[in-house]
Amino acid sequence: MKFFLDTADIGQIEEAASWGAIAGVTTNPTLYARTGGKLADFNNHIARICAVVDGPVSAEVTAEDRAGMVEQAKEVAALADNVVVKIPTTVEGLAATHELYKLGIPVNMTLCFSVPQALLAARAGARYVSPFIGRFDDISEDGLSQVEDIVTALGNYDFGHEIEVIAASVRSAHHVTQCALMGADIATVPFDVLKKMVAHPLTDRGIASFNADWEKVTQA
Ligand code: E4P
């Protein structure tokens, strides 16, 4: 499983990149808004992320019609070689994705909540499809089993191009474990979840006891 960082915060991206832990980044309008960024700085911000990360960086369109999506996608894709355009899984999104597929611009189809949506994204030419776990759980559905079903369904067919499942809206290290066991290609995780993935109380306890014993050695 590969890990993407789900943030637009350049400080977090630089830190996670220094761990050798991340293979890409996903952003969305909310994550960019959280940085305090303004519209005029958006392209520059995405270009800066692309320079830090050695891997795909998803930048989301905000237009809701296919022509607008394609226009925004072309603009953002021109910022760097590693830009992936993030497009919601709607009728207009599918049409835009298919257009961009023909132009060789990679698309991450986002806000995916069902197997039929994922199959259609794959048929339209999406390079990535992002089922959301946490937001599905939020409406009392089972986000993890949705990811499992999507991984299984996409694995049943050859779409004639590469497509990877990005488990998104990840809220815990447990989500990551389950997605890895079901064979999701990628988990995109917020920085706080990435930190929780490293942490284990037995690791901390082990360090404390080794240090206590080493103290005895150095005082002998
Ligand atoms: C994925 O690409 C999205 O940016 C993200 O995972 C959304 O997560 P949230 O539901 O925690 O906002």
Image (spheres, helix red, strand yellow):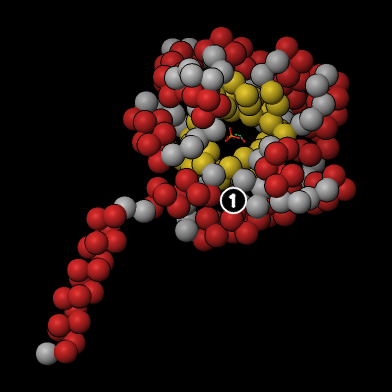
Question: In x, y percent, where is residue 40?
Answer: 87, 48
At 73% across and 19% down in the image, what residue appears?
A: 93
Question: In x, y percent, where is residue 53?
Answer: 61, 52
Where, by quadrant of the figure, is residue 32 drawn?
top right
Point out the image quarter for the C terminus.
bottom left
Give the vertical position of 155 relative to 40 (above or below).
above
Residue position marked by numbered label 1 in the rendering: 54
Image position of 56 (left or right of 154): right
Ligand 1 resides in the quarter of the picture at top right
- Identify the amino acid type marked 1: Asp
Can residue 56 be seen in the rendering of this structure? no
Q: Residue furthest left?
A: 220
Point out the image quarter for the N terminus.
top left
Give the vertical position of 192 relative to 108 (above or below).
below
On whether ligand 1 comes within 8 Å of the CB at mark 1, the answer is no
The number of discs equals 1
At 47% across and 48% down in the image, what residue appears?
A: 194
At 83% across and 37% down in the image, what residue appears?
A: 75
